[in-house]
Amino acid sequence: MNPTLELNRAGQSLWLDNITRELLTSGTLARYIAELSITGLTSNPTIFDQAMKRGSAYDEDIRRLASQGSSPEQIFFDIALEDLSRAADLFRAVHERTARCDGWVSLEVSPHLARDARATLAQARELHARAGRSNLFIKIPGTREGLPAIEEAIFAGVPVNVTLLFSAAQYLAAADAWLRGIERRIAAGLNPDIASVASLFLSRWDVATAGTVPVQLKNRLGVAIGGDAYRAYCELMRSARWLRAMNAGARPQRLLFASTGTKDPTASDVLYVEGLVGPLTINTMPEGTLRAFADHGRVADPLPADGGASSSVLAEFAKAGVDLTALAAKLQDDGAGAFVKSWDDLTGGIAAKAETLRAAAGPRAAGAR
């Protein structure tokens, strides 16, 4: 059996962490859905930035939108919404077959709004409405400043992909924000079935501790963090608070394993897939990791509800001098800063390309006159 199909049948959703115009027009994404059991997709500004720099697929859109006076940010959202709407349509059958549990795509709000919950909510509502697709998540960082926006977006009926989570504690805070929004909808007599996922970033833990811990701990922290968050996730699903919400018509906010591309070339290229098989979870992976797992991945026994060996592994890291709480906070802060840099690189690249295209069109336009 294809390992990706086997993983899907084990109860875990496989999502692709990539989106490009070529992926859509070449039929590659459709093939991944049909042959590799991909049931959703995530995106981020860096992915779009790289796609725009690698080729000319977006040049005509950039030229046209810039000529209409659109800002670089407006150009990005127009292009991203077009691509993600097309991707959402490809996942429509999955979305309907799974009663809207799966078949989602994700679009991120501007990280420059991170400290402004009201502005974040306004943009989240606008983007979701513009897409006109029921299977579009809006990504909001699960930072301290982002938690109020998550709650308000859920209360407003906007499906949310909570991003930038690095620990069980950060996940629990994000899950609490989501559930507050759901409970407010129940109290207001509104439909509480507002989907959400909580994205836990893994590989950056091993990058951050590389060379600072004993060799026997190398590349073990990311999977242990994932197992610890899965323990917290399973405990929440058994809690009276969650069960009351489910009884009123809500569905669980699923745990999503992100940043699952192996960064260490000496480690297994499917490290964060094989080590984190969990029912009712998602693993979103880069194309390289997807192809590697389809080629030689193995579906191991699922994570136990108590996280298995994760607690003992985390204790070993603590004994080795790793302050896990402080490192989680640093990774989230660094990630938020990286989001801003990626956003600025993207909008700056769009501005530069728009100017290049305008200059190139100038002589031709003049000749035409």
Image (cartoon, rainbow, N blue to C red):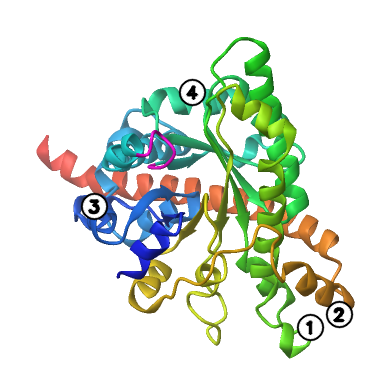
- Locate the N terminus by quadrant: bottom left
Which residue matches tag 3? Answer: 30
Disc 1 + disc 4, Cβ < 8 Å: no
The tag earlier along the polypeptide, 1 or 3, is: 3
| 99 is within the stretch colored magenta | yes
| Residue segment shown in magenta | 98-103
How far apart are the alpha carbons under marks 2 and 4? 47 Å
Q: Which mark is residue 213?
A: 1
Q: Which mark is residue 126?
A: 4
Q: Identify the residue at horizontal 25%, vertical 50% (top origin).
A: 24
Whole-percent x, y for residue 85 in the image: 33, 36
Which residue matches tag 2? Answer: 320
Q: Identify the residue at horizontal 72%, vertical 68% (top origin).
A: 310
- Locate the C terminus by quadrant: top left
Disc 2 + disc 3, Cβ < 8 Å: no
Disc 1 + disc 2, Cβ < 8 Å: yes
Say which amino acid is labelled 2: Ala
Whole-percent x, y for residue 273 in the image: 50, 68
The tag earlier along the polypeptide, 3 or 4, is: 3
For label 3, the SS is helix
Q: Is residue 268 above or below residue 27?
A: below
Which is the main secondary structure of the residues drawn in magenta?
A: loop
Whole-percent x, y for residue 39 in the image: 36, 49
Q: Report whether 111 appears left or right of 25.
A: right
Mark 4 Cα shell of 10 Å, populated few (<14), some (14-19), many (≥20): few
